[in-house]
Image (cartoon, rainbow, N blue to C red):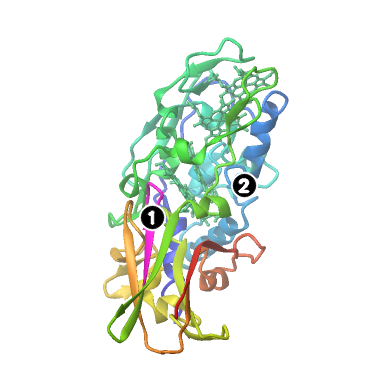
Amino acid sequence: MKPQFILPAVAALLCGLSSAHAHELPQGAEPLQQSEQCAACHPQIVKEWQESFHAKSSVHKDSAHNAMHQAFSKAMTAQGKKPTYHCAACHAPMADNMKALMSGEAAPDSSNASQTEGVGCSFCHRIEAVTHGKSFDQYTLNKDGAYKTSRPTNPKAAHKTGQSPLFADGQICMGCHSQYVNPHEVPICVMTEEGKGNCVRCHMEKAEGAPAAGSEAKTHISHRFPGGHDADMLRKAAALELKVESTGKERVVSIAVKNTTEHTFPSTNPMRMAFVKVRAKNKSGAVIWENFKADPLKEDKQAVFFKAFKAGDKVGVPSWEAEAMAFDTRLKTGETRTLRYPLYSPEISEVEAELIYLLFPPKAIEGFGIPKDGVNDQRFSVAKKSVQMQ
Ligand code: HEC
Ligand code: HEC
Ligand code: HEC
Ligand code: HEC
Ligand code: HEC
């Protein structure tokens, strides 16, 4: 038997299982330009974007996404179905053979630059409308090729620009980031319910340097899009408080974990996991108690922020089988969760708590062959506190 949290990991890849529709570039529209064509005039923004996961989102550049797509394809083949790369709708939105990728007629091809591009400049900046779909949403792009922002048309630009209110608060993000609901109507990733904050304010902060060569502006909006892969961003996600209370003879440590993002922590992706590790030490610094040794989900589930799905009474099924949520212990927007542990040993003189974040649980890495490349297997310390006692 596989441990139960391998399977919910599969859920992430199911954002959009139904062989839905590709994003639309209207008939006769200007072709999509490659991001490197922006580099001569927007060098800094291009460099930031290249470091972001939007530039690495396809199977050709994201080793974790590639491993999960292979696991998905194997599962489909085992069921006698044609493996598809429908993931392309969000992970390779500029692919020039989108429909064939989504139906399984074509396989991903690393020599096709429109696939390796990922979520490129001209895709985002040509978004005209986001249409709400049943299982996931989709985009219509503009015909005239103008690059839009929320600001009025800019005569200083070397190309057509346009104004769209969708850019001001992140509505343009929602065609890919809003939702996936499976055929049983189980919400797999639903950002629209997890938070309604302004995505751009937190994920695209101001950075030094002009937005374009020759521009007089001193700052621009960063395109690094920090998220779960970024230690500094993760430190903004939660706050941790630690207190030891004595009630007569008994000492109890209480640990309050507060979500300081404006969406669930960890957000959307069902593979992300966070947990609190608590250690109590004696005077010489030796650890004499800890809340778990190897597996927090088995040994101290209350300290884990994670979600999993079920079918019938089977917990931990992949999202395409999911009939309901088995549990969702992630921190909701604005939530503070308090964990309490009695400190039985009188020898305890220091307690330490650390909030740890993993992109993928270790067993998912093993189970799906997600490469341990120093990226996917990172272990981030989000917050850490300790108290000394007499
Ligand atoms: C409806 C859009 C959508 C579809 C379709 C989709 N994804 Fe994603 N996927 C996303 C978004 C958005 C993220 C980033 C959000 C996050 O990590 O919380 C993401 C993140 C991921 C990640 C994490 C990547 C990393 O580097 O850590 C994996 C793995 C993944 N998806 C696999 C898949 C696979 C495999 C498929 C197809 C079988 C798929 N996704 C289909 C939107 C989608
Ligand atoms: C020949 C130079 C040049 C190239 C190439 C170029 N741009 Fe620009 N772009 C500019 C200039 C100049 C501005 C105006 C900067 C300012 O006003 O500070 C601009 C502004 C913009 C804006 C902001 C418009 C606004 O003011 O709100 C966007 C978005 C944009 N460009 C996208 C792109 C994209 C995407 C590409 C590549 C497909 C690209 N540009 C290629 C020169 C260029
Ligand atoms: C065309 C689809 C698409 C659009 C539009 C889009 N994203 Fe993404 N985004 C993705 C995918 C796919 C990933 C996951 C890439 C991967 O890791 O493989 C992702 C990843 C991310 C991440 C996680 C980075 C990390 O380190 O894991 C953040 C943050 C993010 N997007 C924010 C935004 C914001 C903010 C917007 C709107 C301004 C936006 N995205 C628009 C598809 C999109
Ligand atoms: C995931 C979507 C997304 C991608 C990909 C993207 N942008 Fe943007 N970009 C935005 C948003 C959102 C804004 C903020 C617009 C606003 O304030 O109205 C923005 C702002 C800009 C601006 C104005 C910056 C300023 O400070 O005035 C320029 C120029 C620009 N982008 C160029 C690019 C270029 C070049 C690329 C590719 C390297 C790119 N963008 C990729 C979403 C995106
Ligand atoms: C108040 C600031 C704030 C706002 C507003 C906000 N985020 Fe985040 N977001 C964060 C922080 C901090 C993290 C890192 C913690 C985490 O991954 O949960 C994060 C993480 C993410 C991730 C990375 C998940 C991963 O698996 O790597 C995605 C995707 C994301 N946010 C998308 C969005 C979208 C889309 C919006 C708009 C609806 C949004 N965020 C609004 C602060 C914010």
Residue at the top extreme, as displayed: 155
**Residue 188: x percent and y percent?**
36, 56
In the displayed structure, does residue 291 sit left or right of residue 212? left
> Per the image, is 255 magenta?
yes
Badge 1 crowding class, 10 Å Cα cut-off, few under 14, some 14 to 19, many 20 or more, is many
Is residue 230 visible to the viewer in this orientation of the structure? no
Identified by mark 1, the residue type is Asn
Q: Look at 69% across and 17% down and name the residue there.
A: 214
From the image, tell me which residue sits under label 1. 259
Q: CA distance from mark 2 to mark 1?
A: 28 Å
Is residue 234 visible to the viewer in this orientation of the structure? yes
Q: Which residues are magenta?
A: 254-263
The N terminus - image quarter: bottom left
Mark 2 Cβ and ligand 3 under 8 Å apart: yes
Q: Look at 57% across and 20% down and name the residue there.
A: 30
Prevailing SS of the magenta stretch: strand
Is label 1 in a helix, a strand or a loop?
strand
Q: Contact, CB < 8 Å: mark 2 with mark 1?
A: no
From the image, tell me which residue sits under label 2. 56
**Residue 167: x percent and y percent?**
45, 28
**Residue 382: x percent and y percent?**
51, 60
- Between 235 and 47, the one lying in front of the other is 235
Question: Dividing the picture into quarters, in which one does residue 41 lie?
Answer: top right
**Residue 249: x percent and y percent?**
30, 87
- Between 211 and 16, the one lying in front of the other is 211
Badge 2 crowding class, 10 Å Cα cut-off, few under 14, some 14 to 19, many 20 or more, is many
